[in-house]
Amino acid sequence: MFGYRAASLCLLLVFVLGFLFSFSFYSGVSSRDVGGQVSARGGVKAGVAVGVYSDALCRVGLSSIDWGELESGASKNTTFYVRNEGKSALLLAFSTANWNPPMAAESISVCWNYDGKPVSPNKVVELVFTLSTSELIVGIDHFSFDIVLSM
């Protein structure tokens, strides 16, 4: 009789611990120590006289990026097109903003291939942004941020 109660108690304990683990993972706080997969989304915001497009002919405006799933330590590229819609040449700059959660910015980096040359009026530049996650990313299952283009 005692063995049956002990086995039942052990099964109940395993069930409760499993439920708690599932709840912490679903709520976005991972109980894993290091690594895993993260999901990323982001906005694209541009300053005055800068148009951002998903196609080289500048027919489809771009305001967000779905980076999809990334393994920890992985990188992913996305390409979009920027057109100078002003009347004079400009130099592009970018920054990131609105990280959610804010601590994601510590384990994730963004860079681009822009060569720093002035962009003439009506000229289109193909830009490749690379998103990289740290191998040591902890506690983040999904995140979002904005890429802000300016001149």
Image (cartoon, grey):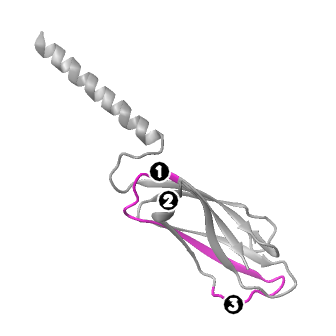
Q: Is residue 113 left or right of residue 49?
A: left
Q: Residues within 10 Å of mark 2 (few under 14, many from 20)?
A: many
Q: Residues within 10 Å of mark 3 (few under 14, many from 20)?
A: few
Q: Is residue 148 visible?
A: yes
Q: Is residue 151 magenta?
A: no
- Residue 104's tag is 2
Q: Is residue 26 left or right of residue 43?
A: left
Q: Nearer the N terminus, badge 2 or badge 3?
A: 2
Q: Position of residue 113 (x, y in %)?
A: 60, 81
- Element marked by disc 3: loop
Q: Nearer the N terminus, badge 1 or badge 3?
A: 3
- Name which residue type carries label 1: Asp
The residue carrying mark 3 is: 117
> Is 3 or 47 nearer to us in this picture?
47
User: Which residue occupies 80% across, 88% down?
Assistant: 89
The residue carrying mark 1 is: 141
- Name which residue type carries label 3: Lys
> Is 58 or 12 nearer to us in this picture?
12
> Residues under labels 2 and 1: Cα distance?
10 Å
- Residue 149's tag is none
Q: Is residue 69 visible?
A: no
Q: Which residues are magenta?
A: 115-142
> Is 100 or 110 nearer to us in this picture?
100
